[in-house]
Amino acid sequence: MKRSWLYYISPCMLAIVICVIGIIAGYASMQSSGGWSYILVIIFAPAIFILLGVDWLVKTITKGNILYIWIIEVIVIIIMIFWYNNRMY
C-alpha cells in the first residue's frame, strides 16, 4: 500500500523541523547574544523528543488514517503551545 505524502509530512514533523531550525539559529547566534540564545536549545530539544513520540504513537493508534493523524496532532501541538505559554507567564 502506497502512503500519501501527507502521512510523512504530518504536523508533528513540521513542528520538529521548526524546532531544529530554532536550535540551529540558537547555536549560530551564540556569540552575538552572549549565550542567551542557548535558551532556544534548552526549550526546543525536549520538544523534539516529545513530538517524535507523539507522532509515532498517533500513527500507530490511528493505523495510518491521515485525517485522524492530522486532527490529533494539531490538537496536541495546540495543547503544547498553550501549556508552554502558561508555564512562561
Image: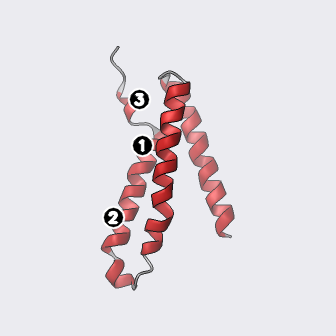
Label 3's element? helix
Amino acid type, mark 2: Ile
34 w.r.t. 78: above or below: below
Taking the spot 48% from the left edge, 25% from the top edge, the residue there is 66
Q: Give yes or no for contact between labels 1 and 2 (Cβ–Cβ under 8 Å).
A: no
Label 2 CA crowd tier, 10 Å (few <14, some 14–19, many 20+): some
Residue marked by disc 2: 24
- The image quadrant of residue 1 is top left
- Quarter occupied by residue 9: top left
**Label drawn at residue 23:** none
Instruction: Relative to 64, say whether 82 is above or below.
Output: below
Which mark, residue 7? 3
- Please determine whether, in this image, residue 61 is positioned above or below residue 50: above
Tell which circle, 1 or 2, labels the residue nearer the N-terminal end: 1
Q: To which residue does mark 1 refer?
A: 13
Residue 39 % position (x, y): 48, 72
Q: Element type at marker 1?
A: helix
Amino acid identity at mark 1: Met
